[in-house]
Image: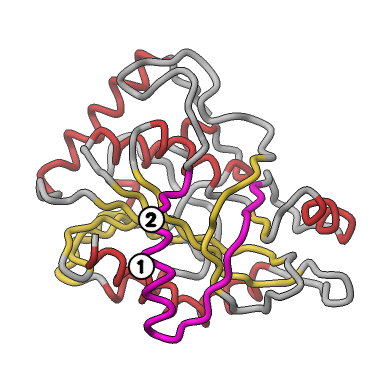
Amino acid sequence: MTIFLLEQMLKILEETALWLRPYISLETKIGIILGTGMSGFVNNIKNKVIIPYEKIPNFPIPTVEGHDGKLIIGQLGNKDVIAMQGRFHYYEGYSMQHVTYPVRVMQFLGFDYLFVSNAAGGMNSTFQVGDVMLIEDHINLFPEHPLRGKNSCKLGVRFLDMSQTYDKKLRCLAKNIANANSIKLQFGIYVGVQGPTFETPAEYHYFRIIGGDAVGMSTVPEVIVARHGGLKVLAFSIITDLGIFGKIVEIDHVEVQKAANIACPRMAFLIEEVVKQI
């Protein structure tokens, strides 16, 4: 897969943003990335325009079941949004440039917010399958950093501060909405790993020791690039399996999708309500 030099990357980002601009209102400032099993979220979006990724210049194409590869443009709550129905993973063979390319496009379109969701294995002993976890911070264990390489001020600063990665005001708002609507919401640290294998019991144990509450194969690169581009981030994990001693069972991608589908309406409600109030 082609790795672009910085000057080439800036050029193709401008091309993609220019192509998408006629479909997107100037008021559109919110991007949403949907994780595995969460395609049903788009039913909440009204007045939809659906664009397959293959029609968008320079966009990668997902290869994983449960990631449909469509850009959904419309209204969520009282705001204009775009939602990615399908994301790109490092384990698919994509470079970090390709994994994070849509987030850069959002930056070039002038977006202010990024909402991210994922399916994750829970390691906190208080978690249950089907729980929704608000991500408070992350641990990056990917083998490549998405900001590696030559930098440009058009993208962001060379050395990015990560002390407030997940926006505090957005997290407080989500917590208040959950409390007001009697929605059980967990809180924790997300560990981002390469995949595509699910974790061994020893790996789950290790990730828990270093401070993780949930582990997954996405999100961290996209969030880093979003913060580099000045977007405020809110992120959720749906706990689709448990990496807790005595509760670890054999898991496959189908089971992950089923668990995510069940929890998706609660997560969708939280995101929609936050969108209404920002």
The residue at 15%/68% (across/down) is 78
Looking at the image, tell me whether mark 2 or mark 1 is earlier in sequence order: 2
Q: Are marks 2 and 1 in contact (CB under 8 Å)?
A: yes
Which kind of residue does numbered mark 1 sit on?
A: Ile
In x, y percent, where is residue 123?
74, 65
Residue toward you, 226 or 21? 226
Quarter where residue 171 is shown: bottom left
Numbered disc 2: secondary structure: strand
In the image, farthest residue toward the bottom: 182
- How far separated are the C-alphas under marks 2 and 1? 8 Å
Q: Is residue 203 magenta?
A: no
As drawn, 247 above or below 75:
below
Find residue 59 and report its horizontal and vertical position in percent.
Answer: 36, 40
> Which range is magenta?
165-192
The label number, if any, that marks residue 271 in the structure image:
1
Q: Which label number is shown at residue 35?
A: none
The three-letter amino acid code for the residue at tag 2 is Phe
Q: Secondary structure at mark 1?
A: helix
Residue 182 in the image: above or below residue 269: below
Q: What numbered label is drawn on residue 115?
A: 2
Q: Is residue 238 above or below residue 118?
A: below
Residue 191 shown in magenta? yes
Q: Nearer the viewer, residue 31 or 230?
A: 230
Q: Quadrant of the C terminus?
A: bottom left
